[in-house]
Image: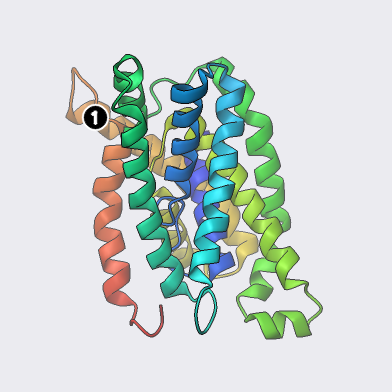
Amino acid sequence: MLAGAALGLSGAILQGVTRNPLADPGILGINNGAALAVVIGIAWFGIGAASSYIWLAILGAGLTAAFVYAVGSIGRGGATPLKLALAGAATSVALSSLTLAVVLPRADIAGGVQSWQVGGVGGATLDWTLLVLPFLGAGLVLALLSARKLNLLALGDDLAAGLGEKVALARAGASLGAILLCGAATAVCGPIGFVGLVVPHVCRLLLGVDHRWLLPASAVGGAGLLLASDITGRILARPSELEVGIVTALIGAPVFIWIVRRQRLRAL
């Protein structure tokens, strides 16, 4: 539930920061950036401490977010929603391939890492939860403090600046909250996709676009979706278990296609 809340909330923040209906930690490559950093730490530096995984995941998520934004800003018009989505998708594929390249020569860690990469909550323990709570708490605070700023950013950068908002700082603060939430959740559960895409859209349809309501609702909705997906995976594949990352992908992929078909290309 904590992981689902973190992913749902980070997705809502990223959609608000980029003004992009396709923004999601998985689609923008942030999940895979966090995963690659953890895998490099394990394979190349022999890092085994749980707290180190969290820091590595947050570092990887932050570097990936900065890279995608920089690539999406190249050319006329700056960081448009369409360019950010394309840059994120390409980066996500590249990072996934790099992770595979790092893991393949290491047969001693390949099994555990590949299982973790699918995304699941079965390995979470109380110790892991206590380690990750401060990072999730800090991300939650930054997210909730950014609600009003995201409402202003939705009006456009020029109008937000005219109303007295410091646009760059508002984006940076909200993005930092999303990176903390996404990185911490990925460190524990692996790169689980589509939660941050599906949940904010449903909450927006139900509650409107005011981020003061949208952000808390996305956290609650993300927790509910990941919990329901985990239960579904355990029931469908019993006595075995279908990892929750597979279930969320099966749910999220049709929603992703629906959003793309619903939005005109110019609107993206």
Residue 160 spot, x, y in % from top left: 71, 79
- Residue with the mark numbered 1: 242
Neighbor class of circle 1 (other Cα within 10 Å; few <14, some 14-19, many 20+) is some
- x 48%, y 65%: residue: 204
Q: Nearer the viewer, residue 264 or 61?
A: 61
Image quadrant containing the C terminus: bottom left
Residue 1 in view: no
Residue 158 in view: yes
Examine the rendered structure and indicate whether residue 14 appears above or below residue 185: below
- In the figure, residue 122 lies in which quadrant? top left
Question: Looking at the picture, which amino acid does disc 1 mark?
Answer: Leu
Residue 222 spot, x, y in % from top left: 46, 46
Residue 200 spot, x, y in % from top left: 47, 59
- x 71%, y 57%: residue: 173
- x 18%, y 26%: residue: 237
Q: Residue furthest right?
A: 164
Q: Nearer the viewer, residue 175 or 221?
A: 175
Give the colouring mode of the picture: rainbow
Q: Nearer the viewer, residue 214 or 259?
A: 259
- x 60%, y 75%: residue: 154
Q: Secondary structure at mark 1?
A: loop
Examine the rendered structure and indicate whether residue 164 appears above or below residue 69: below
Q: How many marks?
A: 1
Horizontal arrangement in the rendering, residue 251 relative to residue 2 (left or right): left
